[in-house]
Image: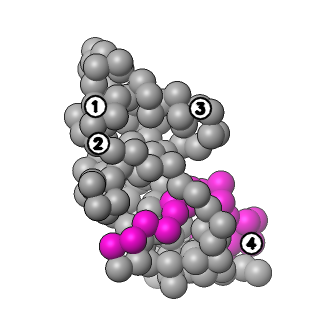
Amino acid sequence: MTNRKLALIVKDQDPLTMAASETVRHACQCMWKRCVGAVLVTDAQQRLVGIFTGRDAVRALAEGKNPAETTLAAAMTANPDTIDPQRTAIDALNAMSDGGYRHLPIVADGKILGVVSRGDFKGLELDNLETETYLWERIG
């Protein structure tokens, strides 16, 4: 399958979510334990308010923030772009490429369904993205 719906990719996913009040250290420990590259940061109603990734962790450390005291609210990327689960793998890859990020939350009607990263996509999907990008560059 060369252009799967995102709903199919995240159907069995249990994304790592945390409250904005959690610390950077705790988030990094959980990311390491679960072998994931992102935490979806939620409010009390489990709505997405931010995303915390390895890049955010590096930035916090580079700024001299103490990871044991710094909250996700202070280190996350607030109000991240999201994508609907009925969109396709190519749509997600294009959004990540255009936005310059590696993780994209999948949200429907305010409910978090999962998160995709470039590693979730298969060879043919990546090949299709490269072909599409090449064609748009040639046209433009």
Marks 1/4 in contact by CB < 8 Å: the verdict is no
* Residue that sits furthest to the front in the current view: 44
Q: Give the magenta-colored segment's residue range.
A: 110-130
Horizontal side of residue 40 vs 102, given as left or right: left
Marks 2/1 in contact by CB < 8 Å: the verdict is yes
Q: Which mark is residue 124?
A: 4
Comparing labels 3 and 2, the label whose residue is closer to the camera: 2
Q: Which residue is mark 1?
A: 71
At label 2, the amino acid type is: Ala
SS of the residue under disc 3 = helix
Observer-nearest residue: 130 or 139?
130
Q: Which mark is residue 16?
A: none
Q: Image quarter for residue 71?
A: top left
Horizontal side of residue 12 vs 6, given as left or right: right
At label 3, the amino acid type is: Trp
Disc 3 crowd, CA 10 A, few/some/many (<14, 14-19, 20+): few
**Image position, residue 42 (x, y; %):** 33, 53
Q: Which quarter of the rendering shows the C terminus?
A: bottom left
Using the image, determine if residue 43 lies above or below residue 95: above
Q: In whole angstroms, how far apart are the C-alphas of marks 3 and 4? A: 29 Å
**Image position, residue 28 (x, y; %):** 48, 30
